Image: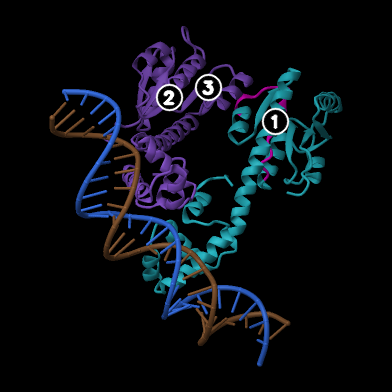
Chain colours: A cyan, B purple, C blue, D brown
DNA sequence: GCGGCTATTGTGGATATCCGCAGGGTTTCA
DNA sequence: TGAAACCCTGCGGATATCCACAATAGCCGC
């Protein structure tokens, strides 16, 4: 990890008054706020690698909040999104949450309440990034394995003895040992137990 | 698993007309519907072991839908709950979904839409029961271990050699082997790899 | 041709795991 | 008192894992 940038609260709302007052509120609580006047402006500047969360108004001229949310999801972004709306719509709220939105808040909102939800969203983002990082490094390790090493690994994880693996692959036990040692090194583990744990846990590193 | 009873759709609504029409709809789609006129009536008859889902009206005389939902959760029930409401309330909908409700539907609803959601809820219930069953049997196995066996198991899962385990616990290697063999038998595994996988996966059996 | 990569194999020695057989001690309970 | 449960230990033998050292062969790119 190279010098992580502090998490940002990205505020997307075409109403300048909201951007000003909400931006002021968030900054007064020690959070870093980045305002955008439109979904298009945000998407043009966005990269999913940025830590933080997004506070997103539902109704905007041009691209709407939900459309932007769909775009983010299509780009593979998992950044938590808090929707803001002036007129509640239950099916939309339910669908948004079930689609993975972090929260859904009606205006006018209570200041403390909103800040709490933003802080929760930032914490959720941090957790999710840690999990993704672990899964990513594991994936990179797996990608370095040769086809043979991968075969041997699957059979090790199936609990088979070297001798049985050798029989099944029609190779010598010595060769199994060589592949075994090589894959353990590439996966950064010392034992089959460690390997099993590495590959079984969703995000643990 | 002894003769599983078919999953039921429990319909809790104090409006008899809704119970009749919705019950008829669900039964016409091959689902088994059990109606209740009140939350109290439902709770008096309920056991979490029953497979199925719950369609629950928000507003009822006596105990309300959300109150009943909280009661179910306190009793440890994970049965999927679909809330029905005549007047949408966004914060309540958002809170209910985030609290774990399966869905939230406004009346009047589209028949097909509701049946689809019920079918989805039943499928989710079946998946969750399978996961709980696996976790439960694993828990029962763990509960059978003696204190010493559990200690040895933790050290095995930490990837330590029997000789190292013996040193740390100040016992002989032969004793480690005895505990090891006993715990493997109690956990129903043959290798440390299998044990690691058994204890690392959330619900897999 | 040469180097890098992958797959393969053998030898010999060391360490690790597994277990039958045998035995002992302590605590609890009927 | 005897049985059950748990913990502990040694011996001997068998199998499994690990690896240094050494070597061969095939494929591919430069």
Q: Is residue B168 above or below residue B136?
A: below
Q: Is residue A80 magenta?
A: yes
| Host chain of mark 1 | A
Q: Are marks 3 and 1 on the same chain?
A: no
- The reply, left or right, for residue C27 in relation to residue B63 is left
Give the residues in magenta.
A77-91
Q: Quadrant of residue C14?
A: bottom left
- State left or right for residue B42 relative to residue A186: left
Name the residue at 64% across, 40% down.
Answer: A128
Residue A152 lies, with reference to residue A157, above or below; the image says: below
Does the CB distance between marks 3 and 2 fall below 8 Å?
no
| Residue on which disc 1 sits | A82
Q: Residue at x 43, y 13 (%)?
A: B39
Secondary structure of the residue carrying tag 2 is loop
Residue named by callout 2:
B77
Say what secondary structure mark 3 lies in. loop
| Position in image of residue A188 (x %, y %) | 58, 57
């Amino acid at each position: 990890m190279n010098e992580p940038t502090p998490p940002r609260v990205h505020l997307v709302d075409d109403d300048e008054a909201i951007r000003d007052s909400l931006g002021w509120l968030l900054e007064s609580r020690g959070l870093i706020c980045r305002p955008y006047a439109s979904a298009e402006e945000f998407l043009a500047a966005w990269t999913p690698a940025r830590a933080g969360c997004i506070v997103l108004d539902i109704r905007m001229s041009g691209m709407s909040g939900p459309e932007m949310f769909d775009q983010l999801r299509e780009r593979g972004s998992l950044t938590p999104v808090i929707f803001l709306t002036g007129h509640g719509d239950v099916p939309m709220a339910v669908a948004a949450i079930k689609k993975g939105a972090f929260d859904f808040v009606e205006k006018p909102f209570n200041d403390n309440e909103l800040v709490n939800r933003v802080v929760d969203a930032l914490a959720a983002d941090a957790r999710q990034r840690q999990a993704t990082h672990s899964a990513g490094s594991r994936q990179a390790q797996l990608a370095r394995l040769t086809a043979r090493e991968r075969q041997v690994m699957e059979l090790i994880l199936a609990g088979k003895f070297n001798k049985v693996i050798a029989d099944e692959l029609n190779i010598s036990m010595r060769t199994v040992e060589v592949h075994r040692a090589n894959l353990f090194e590439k996966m950064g583990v010392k034992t089959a137990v460690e390997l099993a744990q590495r590959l079984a846990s969703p995000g643990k590193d």
